[in-house]
Image (cartoon, rainbow, N blue to C red):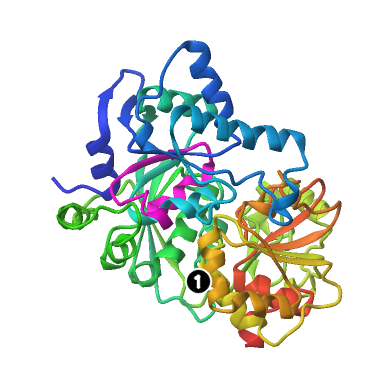
Amino acid sequence: MTKTLYDKLWEEHHIHSYNNGYSLIYIDKHLIHEVTSPQAFEGLKIAGRDIWSRKSIMAVPDHNVPTKMRENGIKDPISKIQVDTLSDNCKKNDLLKFDIEDIRQGIVHVVGPEQGILLPGMTVVCGDSHTSTHGALAALAFGIGTSEVEHVLATQCLLKKKSLNMQIKVIGDMPEHFFSKDLALLIISQIGTAGGTGFAIEYTGQAIRNLSMEARMTLCNMTIEAGATTGLIAVDSKTINYVENKPYTPKGDSFLEAKKYWENLVSDKGAKYDKTIDIDISKSSPMVTWGTSPEMAVGIDEKLPDLDDEKFSSKREDLLNAFSYMGLKEKQKVNSIELDKIFIGSCTNSRIEDLRIVAKIVKDKKIANNIKSAIIVPGSGLVKEKAEKEGLDKIFKKSGFEWRSPGCSMCLGMNDDKLDEYERCASTSNRNFEGRQGRLGRTHLVSPATAAAAAIYGHFVDVRDVL
């Protein structure tokens, strides 16, 4: 019987099925951070339970950590309590943790793959919706709630309904200066933020195979924004080359044995999907979100929607509200949208490849006078170190960017890095709902290339026209 990659991963971790449609599955790796873990540890303490598998856990503070002047500590008292509580819980339970002072510290979904802690074929959970990132490694990964964090800590298992299988088949080659972030936004704009609900999405096609591992992580990261908790890409030589020689990857004969298993983490020929969607990218343009949902996106060379168009009739009220919140007009040209701030970072786009793209665009240029702030936040201390060895930080600083320390930063408005009211930001993060980057802030999701070009010109511009 032929099986999809998702079916293989599910069956290998399945323990028991219940009459209500839920199953108990085994969890290989559990990532924790300071925001969703304190309540879970407290719950264990109250119930008198112990952690089932300490070796399965990796902890790192990322959401609340400052990205500049770290020597001054964390100002916000709640943020400080969360970070300190994570440290206390990890010390008490002897858990692997990368502290703020550790060069390996960074965003949880950057650090795990970077260290080889996350490997193909694993089940991976974290109290963070963008755990789907790790599907790029053919790992069955999904975000969980705080009560589920406690459950996994105590039992190493999770109650979960099996998803249906969706194949998103990408047709054509990636156009020049059209990146994985653009692909993700194009897909979401076509299928909607509920298009993947109830499904595990596997991305297929030559364009997917041509993506680097870091680009695959960006695509799988955004899967949650399409309504699916799981995004997957099959193992190939790029996957195996990526994980080889990582600090926590198996070595020697153990690696060779693991490699044999990993090479089978592909959907069988003729495997049946419950739904297949073809996405033709051959003539696609870099994407920009204009509204308050990732599905509200258009090509950089297009105009904003005309709500008199019949296809928008069912969503007209929502789109009108989005136009009002964002301070934009129907049929407005994308390149007429001026910006206040630029954010390049987050678990979506903060890896070394992203930073190299930005450096290429901004080298020997200056950010526009109307840009109040342009910050670049690497995904980990190791990414920061690598960028500095390559001289990228000097390029950024010379152009007028701030070069920060690793953390989630301006992705979610949970730390010092926020938008002020009505400020407009070109952001490489993953969500743009109302207030995501700060109360009444206006967020446009874009690729690192589009964000970099916008910083130089002060408004959105087609990067294909300026390189």
Q: Which type of secondary structure does the marked residue at label 1 adopt?
A: helix
**Quick check: is 210 in the magenta stretch?**
no
- Which residue is drawn at the image coordinates 61% and 69% (left, top)? 448
Above or below: residue 409 compared with residue 368: above
Residue 17: x and y, percent? 28, 23
Q: Residue at x 42, y 57 (%)?
A: 114
Up/down of 331 relative to 251, above or below: below
Q: Is residue 84 left or right of residue 137?
A: right
Residue situated in front as seen by the camera: 208 or 241: 241
Say few, some or many: other residues with alpha carbon within 10 Å of mark 1 (under 14 / 14 to 19 / 20 or more).
some
The answer to whether residue 269 shows anywhere in this view is: no
Residue 419 shown left or right of residue 220 in the figure: right
Instruction: Give the amino acid at mark 1.
Output: Glu
At which x and y percent is residue 100?
59, 48
Quadrant in the picture for the C terminus: bottom right
Q: What x and y, as percent, mark residue 207? A: 38, 71
Q: Is residue 193 visible?
A: yes
The residue singled out by tag 1 in the image is 353
Please state if 20 lies on the left or on the right of 109 as rendered. Answer: left
Which span is picked out in magenta?
113-135
Name the residue at 34% across, 59% down. 246
Q: From the viewer's perspective, is residue 54 above or below residue 212?
A: above
Foreground of the two, 452 or 271:
452
User: Does residue 426 sit above or below 260 in this rendering?
Assistant: below
Which corner quadrant of the image does residue 23 belong to? top left
Question: Looking at this view, is 327 or 88 the one in front?
Answer: 88
* Residue 46 placement (x, y as % from top left): 53, 12
Q: Quadrant of the N terminus?
A: top left
Q: Residue at x 26, y 35 (%)?
A: 13
Residue 269 picture quarter: bottom left
The count of marks equals: 1
